[in-house]
Image (spheres, helix red, strand yellow):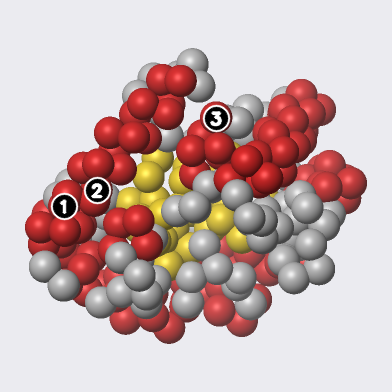
């Protein structure tokens, strides 16, 4: 894998992302590009870093533990995969944002372990907005009461919401799911008094629809690194 294709893909993607942000009525740099580097080797990540990328996403704990120490501490690593409670202690000190806080029970584990490590766990609530049995996440109707309990836990900071929509044939079909997550975030922000600024939604095939509906973080892998 050579540097040039990754650099070229990143440059083209950043142009499209800036344009999509402007179309949504926001600044061109309003959306964070999280380069999903799971399964890709360190040299691919290094190529992306050389092209100016600084935010990366991993979804497997053991892979993240192997890769993250290889790179400068100035990078921001997001954990975007389903996380078992017995892996929190390993991943928490290495990541800046966990996208997949998907239950009240997991939140309690995060709070306890973060307190023991003298850290604050910055997380997104994962919402199963489509109520898809194949996906993890809080039921939309259970999110508000769960958030109320989670906000009472120490050493835990909720920055917003995340979703993975049901598998669809087109980005247009995914767009209503993104709109529902944005609406839910707005309601939760109003009821809780927290800004909940982050909306992590949109991947390589549908990120433009997600940006149009208010995404602040898009998780893109193959459009940067190529096919897995």
User: Which residue does the image show at 49% across and 38% down from the upper left?
Assistant: 208
Q: Which residue corresponds to mark 1?
A: 7
- First reached walking from the N terminus: tag 2 or tag 3: 2
The circle on residue 10 is: 2
Evaluate if marks 2 and 3 touch, with contact meaning CB atoms under 8 Å apart. Answer: no
Left or right of residue 114, residue 190 in this image: right
Q: CA distance from mark 2 to mark 1?
A: 5 Å
Label 2 Cα crowd, 10 Å radius (few <14 / some 14-19 / many 20+): many
The quadrant holding residue 45 is bottom left
The circle on residue 212 is: 3
**Depicted 84 relative to depicted 199: above or below:** below
Residue 12 or residue 154, whichever sits in front: 12
Q: Quadrant of the C terminus?
A: bottom left
Left or right of residue 34, residue 177 in this image: right
Residue 137 or residue 210, whichever sits in front: 210
Q: CA distance from mark 2 to mark 3?
A: 20 Å
User: Which residue does the image show at 50% across and 22% down from the upper left?
Assistant: 24
The spot of residue 149 in percent (x, y) is 82, 49
Q: CA distance from mark 1 to mark 3?
A: 25 Å
The spot of residue 119 in percent (x, y) is 49, 57
The quadrant holding residue 134 is bottom right
Residue furthest top as drawn = 25
From this viewpoint, is residue 157 visible? Answer: no
Secondary element at tag 1: helix
The spot of residue 23 in percent (x, y) is 46, 20
Label 1 Cα crowd, 10 Å radius (few <14 / some 14-19 / many 20+): many
From this viewpoint, is residue 1 visible? Answer: yes
Residue 114 or residue 170, whichever sits in front: 170
**Depicted 227 relative to depicted 57: above or below:** below
Evaluate if marks 2 and 1 touch, with contact meaning CB atoms under 8 Å apart. Answer: yes
């Amino acid at each position: 894998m050579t540097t040039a294709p990754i650099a070229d893909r990143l440059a083209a993607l950043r142009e499209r992302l800036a344009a999509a942000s402007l179309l949504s009525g926001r600044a061109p740099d309003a959306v964070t590009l999280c380069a999903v580097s799971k399964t890709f080797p360190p040299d691919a990540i290094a190529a992306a870093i050389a092209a100016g990328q600084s935010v990366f996403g991993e979804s497997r704990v053991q892979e993240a533990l192997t890769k993250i120490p290889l790179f400068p501490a100035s990078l921001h690593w997001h954990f975007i995969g389903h996380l078992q409670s017995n892996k929190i202690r390993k991943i928490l000190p290495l990541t800046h944002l966990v996208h997949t806080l998907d239950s009240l029970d997991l939140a309690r584990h995060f709070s306890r372990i973060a307190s023991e490590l003298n850290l604050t766990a910055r997380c997104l609530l994962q919402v199963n907005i489509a109520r898809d049995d194949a996906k993890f996440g809080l039921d939309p109707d259970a999110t508000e009461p769960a958030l109320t309990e989670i906000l009472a836990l120490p050493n835990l900071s909720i920055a917003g919401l995340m979703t993975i929509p049901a598998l669809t044939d087109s980005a247009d079909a995914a767009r209503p799911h993104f709109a529902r997550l944005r609406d839910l975030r707005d309601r939760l922000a109003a009821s809780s008094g927290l800004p909940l600024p982050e909306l992590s939604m949109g991947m390589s095939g549908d990120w433009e629809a997600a940006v149009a509906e208010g995404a602040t973080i898009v998780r893109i892998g193959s459009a940067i690194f190529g096919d897995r």
